[in-house]
Amino acid sequence: MAKIGDLKLRYRIFMKTYRYRSADWGSGARLQVPLSEAKIAVVTTAALYKPEQEPFDEELKGGDPSFRVIEQGTDLSTLRLGHRSEAFDHTGVLSDANLALPLDRLVELQAEGRIGSINPRHFSFMGSITAPGRLLSKTAPETAQMLLEDQVDAVVLTPV
């Protein structure tokens, strides 16, 4: 496991001086059906996007709060990675996008009867957003609403 001391000096300084926000997460949601009957979606912060989608804006001050929809059945080998953090080692995700967006693993779990179904769409955000105001006020609620509309029972969150 990486430690703060493993980072470049500028990242160590950033991590020590950054004013972290706190959020009241409440008690969270409880699964209302057995996992073997649940509809599952994935939300990742790996900034994965399809070639035909607009890339994440790596230059946007504070980070790009937008998201990209990745449909179930997308060929994961075609996805591009727009994560802006140099502190994030892209090697693993570039070799297998399932590390951040485990759609192939969900297919296996469904075939084994461990989960009920897989949502037709999944969501990719950019990680390393240092100014999350727009994310918290706009795009996260939009995504949550879409998941509710899709009647998703559980979300696999893969923070990167």
Image: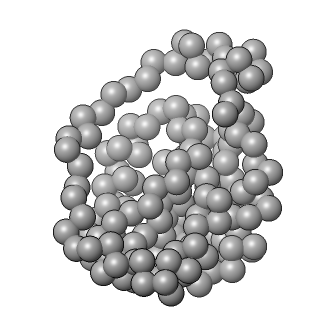
Q: Where is residue 112 in the image (x, y as percent from the top left)?
A: 49, 84
Q: Locate residue 142 relative to residue 16 in the image: left or right.
A: left
Residue 117: quarter of image: bottom left
Colour mode? one colour
Q: Is residue 42 above or below residue 159?
A: below
Furthest toward the bottom, the residue is 111
Q: Position of residue 140 (x, y in %)?
A: 37, 53
Q: Where is residue 109 in the image (x, y as percent from the top left)?
A: 50, 77
The residue lying at 48 percent from left, 70 percent from top is 122
Whether residue 79 is visible to the viewer of this picture, yes or no, is yes
The residue lying at 75 percent from left, 42 percent from top is 89
133 vs 113, nearest the viewer:
113
Total numbered circles? 0
Q: Locate residue 48 relative to residue 157 in the image: left or right.
A: right
Q: Locate residue 129 relative to residue 144 in the image: left or right.
A: right
Q: Position of residue 149 (x, y in %)?
A: 27, 75
The residue lying at 36 percent from left, 82 percent from top is 116
The residue lying at 59 percent from left, 46 percent from top is 160
Whether residue 55 is visible to the viewer of this picture, yes or no, is no
116 vs 114, nearest the viewer:
114
Residue 62: quarter of image: top right
Q: In this view, does 121 lie above or below 47?
A: below
Quadrant (top left/top right/bottom left/bottom right) for the N terminus: top right
Q: In this view, does 57 lie above or below 6?
A: below
